[in-house]
């Protein structure tokens, strides 16, 4: 366990640095937005582009892992959605958009910021699986959630039968730097192109800032929030940090059985705390976000212990 903590504690120490810097107002007012913009628009896209582009497509796609991870994600998503609709998450029954936002929070972890940096410390060989998981998250979970929210809001506007939910969803995704970076990397990978040395060096330097920058940005984003846990927030944290990784583990280890190392990385990805994307998307569709925001903050703090325990149980260190 000591070897595990040697990996996880430095990673979360960077998160804590950001938290202290923002909480004690050591950063200018707009600095947190600037750090997030740099990480989201430049550093992380460069890292993801390299992870995808520098490997043959055959090394990236693992069908056993893909099917096993997606089915587990959809099973948990449906369970949380039904529980939210019936008011069984410690809150009154939610409408379709609110239930979709809560389901998104549970099944869409902070793989892009926290996951990449932490798992890279565990093993650089795991990054292709992390990139594949991010692709699956976007293609299945994020798109499904946005479509459900669009349908709900369309019904509220009385336009559900006339307007397609797909156009705004894909228009939004097409503007995402992470989606564009992964798509560009897939093109390079599929055609087997070599990166020119200038592009290779540029993306390597820029991508190298992704890990530390993302970890600091997580803490800075949480710095102004008060950590609190009530019945609903506790249920969301338990579902995200326990239920979801257990479901992925059962699917990968007992049913679909990809390579054990790949399966372990998938479970570790599922064990990441909730991503800020779930809050951002929910806010965009006018969904109540107080519980999601609080669950992200408190869940990130609790995940110091749960992620360390997960790595130890999986034998990754």
Image: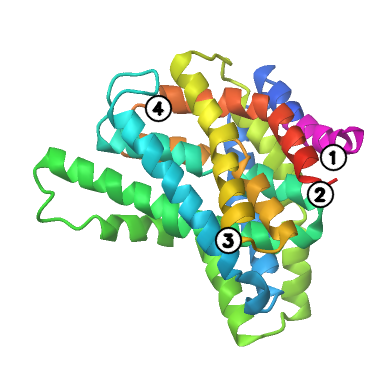
Q: CA distance from mark 3 to mark 1?
A: 29 Å
Instruction: Return the disc, 4 or 1, that comes first in the chain's sequence.
Output: 1
Q: Which residue is mark 1?
A: 7
In the rendered image, residue 8 lying in the magenta stretch gets the answer yes
Q: Is residue 48 rendered to the left or right of residue 137?
A: right
Question: Crowdedness of circle 3 by 10 Å Cα count: few (<14), some, many (20+)?
Answer: some
Label 3–label 1 contact, CB within 8 A:
no
Q: Are discs 1 and 2 less than 8 Å apart at CB?
A: yes
Residue 24 position in % (x across, y down): 69, 16
Label ID, residue 122: 2
Q: Which residue is mark 4?
A: 289
Q: Nearer the viewer, residue 257 or 59?
A: 257
* Left or right of 269 in this view: 229: left
Q: Quadrant of residue 279?
A: top left
- Picture quarter containing residue 301? top right
Q: Which of the two residues, 169 or 307, is positioned nearer the viewer here?
A: 307
In the structure shown, which secondary structural element does the residue marked by tag 1 occupy? Answer: helix
Magenta residue span: 1-15
Tell me which label, 2 or 4, sits earlier in the chain. 2
Residue 309: image location, x then y, percent: 75, 33
Considering the numbered disc 2 on the image, is that residue within a helix, a strand or a loop?
helix
The picture places residue 141, in percent across and down from the top left corner, at 43, 51
């Amino acid at each position: 366990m000591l070897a595990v903590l040697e990996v996880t504690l430095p990673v979360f120490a960077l998160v804590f640095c950001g938290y202290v810097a923002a909480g004690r107002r050591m950063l200018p007012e707009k600095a947190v937005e600037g750090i997030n913009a740099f990480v989201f628009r430049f550093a992380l896209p460069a890292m993801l582009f390299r992870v995808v582009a520098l490997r043959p497509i055959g090394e990236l796609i693992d069908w056993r892992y893909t099917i096993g991870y997606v089915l587990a994600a959809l099973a948990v998503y449906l369970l949380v959605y039904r529980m939210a609709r019936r008011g069984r998450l410690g809150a009154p029954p939610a409408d379709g958009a609110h239930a979709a936002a809560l389901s998104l929070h549970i099944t869409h972890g902070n793989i892009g910021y926290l996951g990449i940096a932490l798992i890279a410390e565990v093993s650089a060989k795991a990054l292709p699986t992390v990139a594949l998981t991010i692709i699956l998250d976007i293609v299945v979970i994020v798109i499904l959630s946005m479509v459900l929210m669009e349908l709900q809001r369309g019904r509220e506007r009385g336009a559900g039968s006339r307007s397609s939910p797909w156009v705004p969803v894909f228009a939004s995704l097409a503007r995402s730097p992470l989606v564009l970076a992964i798509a560009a990397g897939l093109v390079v990978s599929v055609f087997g192109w070599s990166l020119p040395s200038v592009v290779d060096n540029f993306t390597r330097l820029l991508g190298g800032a992704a890990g530390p920058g993302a970890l600091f940005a997580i803490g800075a984003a949480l710095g102004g929030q008060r950590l609190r846990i009530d019945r609903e927030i506790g249920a969301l944290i338990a579902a995200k940090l326990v239920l979801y990784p257990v479901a992925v583990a059962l699917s990968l280890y007992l049913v679909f059985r990809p390579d054990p190392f790949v399966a372990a990385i998938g479970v570790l990805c599922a064990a990441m705390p909730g991503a800020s994307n779930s809050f951002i998307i929910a806010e965009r569709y006018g969904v109540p976000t107080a519980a999601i925001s609080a669950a992200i903050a408190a869940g990130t703090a609790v995940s110091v212990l749960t992620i360390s325990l997960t790595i130890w149980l999986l034998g990754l260190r």
